[in-house]
Image (cartoon, rainbow, N blue to C red):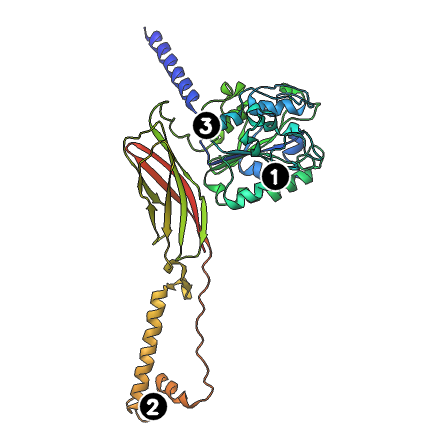
Amino acid sequence: MAGKKIHSALILCFALLASLATQAQAPVSSHVYVVMEENSNYSDIIGNGNMPYLNSLASQYGLATNYYANTHPSIGNYFMLTTGQIITNNDGYTGTVSASNIFSQLIANGKTWKSYAEGLPSVGWISGDSGNYLQRHNPAAYMSDVKASGSAVVKNIVPFTQFATDRAAGTLPQFSFIVPNVLNDLHDGSDVQADNWLTNNIKPLIDSANFKVNDLLIIVFDEAQDTDTAHGGGQVAMVVIGPKVKQGYQSTTFYQHESLLRMLSEASGLTSFPGAGASAPEMTEFFSVSAPPPPPPVGSPDFAITATTASQTVPRGQTATYGLSLAASNPPLGSPVTLSCSGLPSAAACSFAPNSVTLGASPVSSTMTVTTSVTSASLSPLPNGHQIPVGGKMALWSSLAVFGLFGSFRVAMGCGSSAGQAPTASAATAGSAGNPNPTPTPTPTPTPTPSKTFTITVTATSGTLVHSVPVTLTLQ
């Protein structure tokens, strides 16, 4: 009897663990980026002294030490990473892919995306190779939903030069597929060239304040050298980078491109995964935070909030404004959506116009204004690290001025000092009035206060539904 109870308890325990495992998923990120590299064995990349920047990222963030490509040559791996199927192993393939893919899922779910391809001749180019640009490294160019006649989303395929422009303007999409040209992705160029390209083009993104809030970046190689056929495409490097990624983490779990497809989809907020991505092992071990609660059941009223202005930089004492967009799914909601904020700098305040909105079929906009205080910017150093605020300085100088006038008055009245005593400082000052070139008293120069960046959380609440979005504020 006891043995049966233990057996039943073990079955229940394993069932619970299996249930928890199936519920785990990668946390949703504000922006997801994947950078594709080419044709290199894992052992030729990790520990390579000619690639210090990539190896520094692999040491600082997450590294998959047991990750394998699916096939040779390249094109099948790009399709596995985006459709969950190899589709073809013909690098000269010019057909159209109608299988479900990550781009079609993003389109269906209203997510923004772009494919940034270095060397692409023009926006929307789907007419094959050009110079150092190879179309087989840009899978979006094959997808039926993208290249359909009259499709507007074909314009989401853009030259890589647009990436820096979008980053500077704060208009990067939610999902970015980044394709260096063949000289910079280790296809034809050297390891030094590839690492320099990452340093010049990807490091500014990783170092930015916006990225450090809630973004995710993957750097992955499509396949190993042809001589390594283990698990189809050989062992390759895959690095996971972001604020929610475990620091200095190394995974020994066996993964292939379909698992990365699932992770990229989950991090983009998708709940349906193309092809083999639907059953691929999860990669949640790389993250130090749990995924948010699952979305409400299909058909339940809900809403989303996004920041159309993600960051602002203003001098202290000035105001910063942020655009917000709120949209309902399956309206009407049970109650209006009210807005609030947290994480403000000291002595700052926020307001919304409007502060409460009723959502219907169309999105509604609101503007958040953050009013900052000038006093926090006007601190000058004093001995032993003490500081006097601007208001305190004005009071101090006013007091000194009054004291000087009073001292002068005492001298004029003959009561400034006794016989034989040295005149007071006020009398000496008064006595210098006859000096045609008096030495001016130097005005102290306050030390500039360094810039500081704050992450402000905007929270939208409607009944029991609560959603938030982060924005950044840099005070100079």
Q: Nearer the viewer, residue 52 or 174?
A: 174
How far apart in space, not on screen, are marks 2 and 1 (Cα)? 81 Å
Look at the image and tell me in which quarter the C terminus lies. bottom left
The amino acid type of the residue labelled 1 equals Phe
Q: Residue furthest bottom?
A: 419
Q: Quick one: SS at disc 2?
A: loop
**Residue drawn where x is 48% and y is 42% of the image:** 212
The amino acid type of the residue labelled 3 equals Asn
**Residue 110 visible:** yes
Hey, which quadrant is residue 78 in on the image?
Answer: top right
Q: Nearer the viewer, mark 2 or mark 1?
A: 1
Q: Is residue 162 left or right of residue 449?
A: right
Hey, which quadrant is residue 158 in on the image?
Answer: top right
Question: Mark 2 sits on what residue?
Answer: 421
**Residue drawn where x is 44% and y is 71% of the image:** 444
Pick whichever of labels 2 and 3 is earlier in the sequence.
3
**Residue drawn where x is 33% and y is 10% of the image:** 5
Pick whichever of labels 3 and 1 is earlier in the sequence.
3
How far apart in space, not on screen, are marks 3 and 1 (Cα)? 25 Å
Q: Is residue 221 left or right of residue 240?
A: right
Pick whichever of labels 2 and 1 is earlier in the sequence.
1
Question: Mark 1 sits on what residue?
Answer: 160
**Residue 255 visible:** no
User: Residue 361, percent across and down?
Assistant: 36, 31
Disc number placed over residue 214 in the picture, else none: none
Look at the image and tell me in which quarter the N terminus lies. top left
The amino acid type of the residue labelled 2 equals Gln
Question: Mark 3 sits on what residue?
Answer: 109
Q: Quick one: SS at disc 1?
A: loop
